[in-house]
Amino acid sequence: MRIAVTGASGFCGSHVARTAAGLGLDVLCLGRNPGPVGRHRPWDATTGDPDLSGADLVVHCAAAVGDPAPPTAGAGSAAEAQQYAVNVTGTERLLRAAAGRPVVWVSSASVYDPRLPRTLVTEDHPTGGGHLNAYGRTKAAGERLALAAGAVVLRPRAVYGPGDPHLAPRLLERVRHGLLLLPGPDVRLSLTAVPNLADACLAALGVTGPAWAAGAYNLADARPYRRDAAVRAVLAAHGVRARIGHVPAPLARLAARTGRIPGLTPYAVDQLAHSVVLDTSRARATGWLPRWDLSSVPLRGPAPPDGPGPRRG
């Protein structure tokens, strides 16, 4: 069985590729750079269709990820055009090349409309508007194409683990003089360990059990976390001593809109200031279970060559 993994040199894609190789699959890594295992076929999602010849299964992890601060961001900006070229036009190219092969399309909980309460988000939560950055808008547009083509669409939230290039670095860079300011009071948040995502990608394709029906599925760790406790765990894992302080959420939103604080964006404030808990019952009904959490996944350093850690279960 041969599986093609796009974006295999990236954070999520590299974990999917390693997990697939560990299960005995022949891995074909597509992207601008070689993946950690298997064979490499160059592909730039902005320039042409990928070569999927010989592949039986496809996991599409390639994505343009970013959250530029105002005023350079927004609809019609160059930053949005760049993300659209990968997340939407690149999806069109991938689906055309897949030509009926089973496809898992890795999306994000960022597609959900943030204007509505998200204390328990099901897959039926609206995705058609309200997004606070280009990433949310373009991922929502890309996944609509994937769903229309009959793919399995996975929606993790705040993926973390070894090799994380986004969440932990952004938190660490906000520490100033032993203080990390967070918007609003403590809230409950869903997070997704990257090995849980990798396991779901292979499960959805039928590698480790019955293949999942086409459609969207939320993915997250078994239980939501208290935000402040999760942040303290990340700080401790990186050897950073810092006190957590709280800034009123309206003040944080105002600062984000004006762009006065480098790196602070409306999306970042929204992700930290509101309770966002994913209902994962649809994914669990397939037999998939999240086996990893903050206590069992390394929170710093690169992903080890043989994967994120000893497999369990």
Image (cartoon, rainbow, N blue to C red):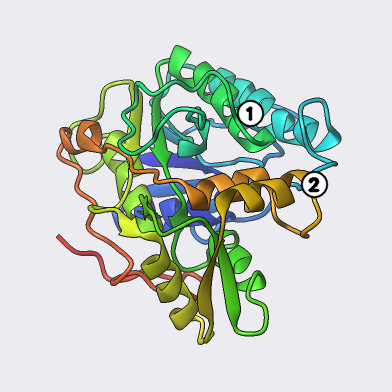
For the residue pair 89 and 50, the one nearer the viewer reads as: 89
Q: Is residue 135 left or right of residue 187?
A: right
Q: Amino acid at mark 1?
A: Thr
For this orientation, the residue located farthest to the top is 148
Q: Amino acid at mark 2?
A: Thr
Q: Which residue is mark 2?
A: 258
List x then y, in percent, for residue 165: 59, 62
Q: Nearer the viewer, residue 168 or 101?
A: 168
The residue located at (54%, 31%) in the rendering is: 52
Task: In the rendered view, tell whether residue 136 sits above or below residue 214.
Answer: below
Q: Residue at x 14, y 39 (%)?
A: 287
Which one is earlier in the sequence, the residue at label 1 or at label 2?
Answer: 1
Q: Residue at x 50, y 55 (%)?
A: 184
Is 282 left, or right, of 215 in this rendering?
Answer: left
Quadrant containing the C terminus in the rendered view: bottom left
Judge the density around disc 1: few (<14), some (14-19), many (≥20) Cα neighbours within 10 Å: many
Indicate left or right for 36 with 209 as reference: right
The residue indicated by pointer 1 is 138
For mark 1, give the secondary structure. Answer: helix
Regarding mark 2 in the picture, which secondary structure is present there? helix
Residue 200: horizontal and vertical position, in percent? 31, 43
Query: Residue 312: horizontal and vertical position, in percent?
Result: 19, 64
The circle on residue 255 is none
Is residue 307 something that shows in the picture?
no
Side of 82 relative to 304 (left or right)? right
Cα distance between the residues tagged 1 and 2: 23 Å
Against 284, residue 161 (above or below) is below
Residues marked 1 and 2 touching at CB (< 8 Å): no
